Image (cartoon, helix red, strand yellow):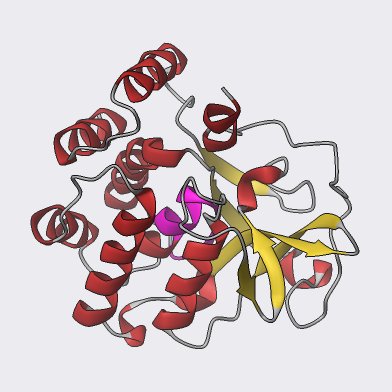
């Protein structure tokens, strides 16, 4: 149950060993820089990030989003990166399904495969990385602080941030400790999302249109002992789009 809660921490944050006040760092987090930014927020969701991906693709295909930026945590970080792709999003996503082996019981391996494929297939200029914002949880003075990372220099840096934003020790990662900017960091979904400092024009989440669907899928994940099949992920994606 703890694992499932971590995967699906949509609306509520942890209150122990957590400081809910955003840590201010002028190089990473600057409240004033977001005052005039319109965000689409994409929540954490574990494998249900593929459901979010379907919703994201529908919006990308049917609305003009040039004036919007994207902010995500955990699975939402990956979706946000995909949303910043400059060209045909449908082609990009179906290329992932066609070229990345998504049958696994190891989420860490799946993330590495996705990262390796994207890095080897695309280049930094294929993405509007200036529109990408990723939430992580940083450990500082035995407290976790919410941090928003932006201003990515290249695609490799953005993909690495997606991985650390999805870091739940030995669940979505094969390590207990991960570092980003020389700080110990964890999954960005440990806090209320989107951050209260961010005005979210629209929030994409697994419970956006079909809350009952989520419970059934959680039970299915337990029964399969966290095995993930490409068929299930594609079905989630199609359901989200529909």
- Could you say which quadrant of the image residue 235 lies in? top left
> In the figure, 27 relative to 98: above or below?
below
Q: Position of residue 30 (x, y in %)?
A: 80, 72
Q: Position of residue 189 (x, y in %)?
A: 62, 46
> In the figure, 104 relative to 69: above or below?
above
Q: Where is residue 228 in the image (x, y as percent from the top left)?
A: 26, 38
> In the figure, 156 relative to 178: above or below?
below
In the picture, the quarter occupied by the N terminus is top right
The answer to whether any part of residue 63 appears in the image is no
Between 210 and 187, the residue placed more toward the observer is 187
In the picture, the quarter occupied by the C terminus is top left
Tell me where the magenta segment starts and ends, as one range.
Answer: 66-80
Between 17 and 59, the residue placed more toward the observer is 17
Q: Residue at x 20, y 49 (%)?
A: 102
Residue 176 on the magenta span: no
Between 221 and 87, the residue placed more toward the observer is 221
Q: Which residue is drawn at 44% across and 65% down?
A: 66
In this picture, residue 217 sits left or right of residue 170: left
Q: Residue at x 33, y 52 (%)?
A: 60
In this picture, residue 100 sits left or right of residue 116: left
Between 40 and 229, the residue placed more toward the observer is 229
Residue 76 on the magenta span: yes
The answer to whether any part of residue 60 appears in the image is yes
């Amino acid at each position: 149950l703890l694992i499932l809660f971590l995967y699906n921490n949509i609306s509520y944050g942890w209150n122990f060993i957590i400081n809910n006040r955003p840590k201010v760092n002028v190089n990473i987090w600057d409240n004033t820089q977001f005052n005039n930014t319109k965000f689409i927020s994409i929540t954490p969701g574990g494998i249900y990030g593929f459901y979010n991906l379907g919703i994201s693709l529908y919006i990308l295909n049917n609305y003009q989003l040039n004036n919007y930026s994207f902010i995500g945590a955990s699975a939402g970080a990956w979706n946000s990166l995909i949303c910043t792709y400059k060209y045909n999003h449908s082609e990009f996503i179906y290329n992932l399904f066609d070229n990345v082996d998504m049958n696994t019981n190891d989420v860490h391996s799946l993330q590495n495969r996705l990262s390796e494929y994207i890095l080897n297939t695309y280049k930094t200029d294929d993405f509007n990385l200036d529109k990408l914002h990723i939430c992580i949880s940083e450990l500082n003075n035995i407290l976790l602080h919410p941090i928003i990372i932006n201003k990515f220099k290249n695609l490799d840096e953005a993909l690495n941030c997606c991985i650390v934003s999805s870091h739940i020790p030995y669940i979505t990662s094969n390590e207990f400790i991960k570092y980003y900017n020389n700080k110990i960091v964890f999954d960005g979904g440990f806090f209320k999302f989107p951050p209260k400092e961010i005005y979210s024009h629209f929030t994409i989440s697994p419970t956006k249109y079909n809350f009952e669907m989520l419970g059934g899928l959680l039970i299915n994940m337990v029964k399969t002992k966290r095995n993930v099949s490409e068929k299930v992920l594609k079905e989630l994606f199609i359901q989200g789009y529909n």
